[in-house]
Image (tube, grey):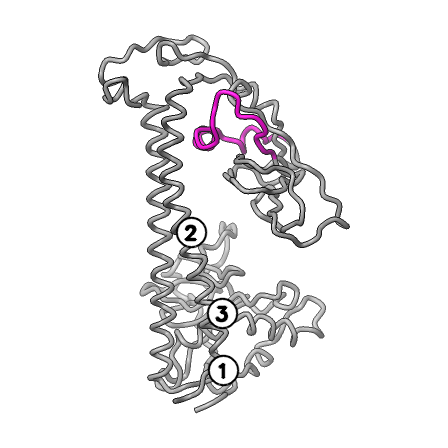
Amino acid sequence: MGYKKLSELVNLVDIKNTDCKVTRVIGVSITKNFIPSVANLNGVDLTKYNLIKKNQFACKLMSVGRDLQLPIDLYKEDDLALISSAYYVFEVKDENDILPDYLNMWFRRKETDRWVGYISGGDVRGGISWDMFLEMDVNVLSIEKQSEIVAQYQTVGNKIKVNEQICEKMEATAQALYKQWFVDFEFPNDDGLPYKSSGGTMVFNEELEKEVIEGWEVGTIGDLFTFQRGHDLPSQDRIYGEYPIFASTGIAEYHNEFKIDKPTIITGRSGSLGELFYYDQPCWPLNTSLYIIDFKKALPFYSLYFLQTINLKELGAGSAVPTLNRNDIHMLVKEIPSYSIIELFESKIILINNQKDNYIKQNQKLTQLQSLLLSRLVRLEEN
């Protein structure tokens, strides 16, 4: 065994959806994962799309030099799917020679991304041809060794998925608790029983047009907390550092300075609206974002889950570039819960979030282990 050209290992597959029996269309993300297609398929002739089946690869070779990423993944589902003809579909020639999962690991190496970026240097758009792609060298070990390596990699990957599922369940638990306490008004009363269903006093509020807890105030969101517009960061100041720069879609870059060093909620101000980010470390909210500067009668996690009930995209609609005005949020009328209930809610969510953070940190280490396993593929030899 030893190094072989990719051309020795794979065959191109070009089977069209001629009978149009398959309608599910997928693509490959830049992070090397199959995703549902986001293209508008109304009126599109799906007979021109390629079929892809289990243990076949799909990759797009356009713009790999510009993006420095090779969008590629191994399809593992039993049902057929469709993929645009902009993708190449291929499969291994002989699974007794190389395992599809092992080859997929080879494609996921950072060195592979750098290689496709390097050989694309002569193309204006940063693309490479299929023939160029086939020139890739692959370290082919014995099937036994490949199986061993794949098993190690998949064990780590499965643990990451389990941790992600646990985190999703914890997040669902937190959201359900918010709904139970502040939408259904079933927070614990002085006896530890659900407030509303245990006979807690409710009064009808004409301004909100609904029943609220007797004794709770009615005010505006600005009474609970206030947003601040993010800060400019001139391009010449974009120096790599340890502090995240939050844009409208989340962490965009890192900087060596920060603007805020306490827990806050960050959301998009211009362009991409709707996503909310809780962050409790020093960071720099960019000018395309809003962040909470003052929790008046609220606390961070209560504010986060409350804001998730508001259609921020709708608030920011109405212009060519959707823009969210913080004053529009501040002026919304809302019931203001008892601060002691908010504090109790916060304490429970903090416990959930701390557990979730532990799983996230585990996954960060596991992801590093995956990267290490991938980087070692080039150096592995038969025993």
Picture coordinates of residue 8, whole percent (x, y):
48, 87
Looking at the rendering, the stretch of residues picked out in magenta corresponds to 290-318
How far apart are labels 3 and 1 at the CA level? Answer: 16 Å
Numbered disc 1: secondary structure: helix
Q: Residues within 10 Å of mark 1 (few under 14, many from 20)?
A: few
Most distant residue in the right direction: 236
How far apart are labels 2 and 3 at the CA level? Answer: 21 Å
Residue that carries the numbered disc 3 in the rendered image: 108
**Position of the N terminus by quadrant:** bottom left
**Position of the C terminus by quadrant:** bottom left
Numbered disc 2: secondary structure: helix
Q: Residue at x 34, y 42 (%)?
A: 170
Residue 359 within the magenta-colored segment of the rendering: no
Q: Which amino acid type corresponds to the residue marked 1 in the rendered image?
A: Arg
Q: Residue at x 57, y 44 (%)?
A: 249
Residue that carries the numbered disc 1 in the rendered image: 379
